[in-house]
Image: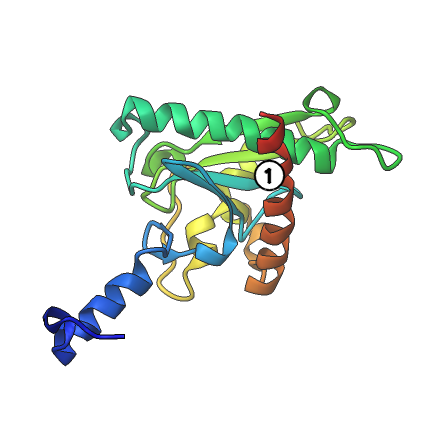
Amino acid sequence: MVLRPFISHPVFLSRHIRAMSSKNLIHFGPFEVTDQVFYKAPLCYALVNIKPVLPGHVLVIPYRPAQRLTDLSQDEVTDLFTTVQKVQKMLASNYFGADGAAGKVEDGSFNITIQDGKWAGQTVAHVHCHIIPRTKGSDEGDGIYDRLESEEGNVGGGLWDQSRPTQHGKFPRIEDADRKPRSAEDMNREAALFREQMVLVDAKS
């Protein structure tokens, strides 16, 4: 292989390699989350959650680090919510089934929510939509929103090791302070499972 002169300079080559290696990295706000992504759409991606309030609680996030929902373009909004619908179908298949059969969306319910801004409890200044499966018989009701607004739902705090962002727009609950973020290994395993399931959802679309 012959290197062309324009990349033969060591400094340029180093920059070129760094650019190539970082091109495929995915960020949620300041956090690199590539390994935890289980689905990629043209303008957004789906991510397993470091601090799920219930099993199957995941996030859908635009690639572009827009802070507010109103900052998104029409195409981004369309892609975001189309992806939310696809992820719902995958989660329903995994969490709403019975007796070994895959579940359907109508076999359960979902909380779909966006904490749009700091005073709504947003701790990562990058639009993200929460998708939370709710199985039949769940009696928590609106209490799920208290959990999202508390330390338990502090996604940014779970991703930061130090200097945790303060969550606003909440009524803190002391018992949530002991809740520990999941390990990268746990999140990667879940992401791998969900990737396989999303292939099946796409095949049916």
Quarter of the image for the C terminus: give it: top right
Q: Residue at x 34, y 35 (%)?
A: 119
Residue placed most toward the observer, 155 or 47? 47
Residue placed most toward the observer, 84 or 152? 84
Task: Note whether residue 186 is visible.
Answer: yes
Question: Residue 33: where, in percent of width, then height?
Answer: 43, 55
Determine the secondary structure under disc 1.
helix
Residue type, numbered disc 1: Met
Quarter of the image for the N terminus: give it: bottom left
Question: Residue 96: where, in percent of width, then height?
Answer: 75, 31
* In the displayed structure image, the side of residue 89 where residue 177 appears, left or right: left
How many dots with numbers? 1
Colour pattern:
rainbow
Q: Which quadrant holds residue 115?
A: top left
Residue denoted by label 1: 198
* In the displayed structure image, the side of residue 23 where residue 6 appears, left or right: left
Task: Note whether residue 171 is visible.
Answer: no
Q: Residue at x 41, y 60 (%)?
A: 160
Please identify the residue farthest to the front as the structure is shown: 1
* In the displayed structure image, the side of residue 70 where residue 100 appears, left or right: right
Please identify the residue farthest to the right as the structure is shown: 99
Question: Residue 37: where, in percent of width, then height?
Answer: 49, 49
Q: Residues within 10 Å of mark 1 (few under 14, many from 20)?
A: some
Residue placed most toward the observer, 6 or 85? 6
Question: Residue 85: where, in percent of width, then height?
Answer: 54, 26
Residue 110 to residue 126: above or below: above
* In the displayed structure image, the side of residue 3 where residue 147 appears, left or right: right
Residue 13 to residue 170: above or below: below
Q: Residue at x 32, y 55 (%)?
A: 30
Q: Residue at x 64, y 36 (%)?
A: 200
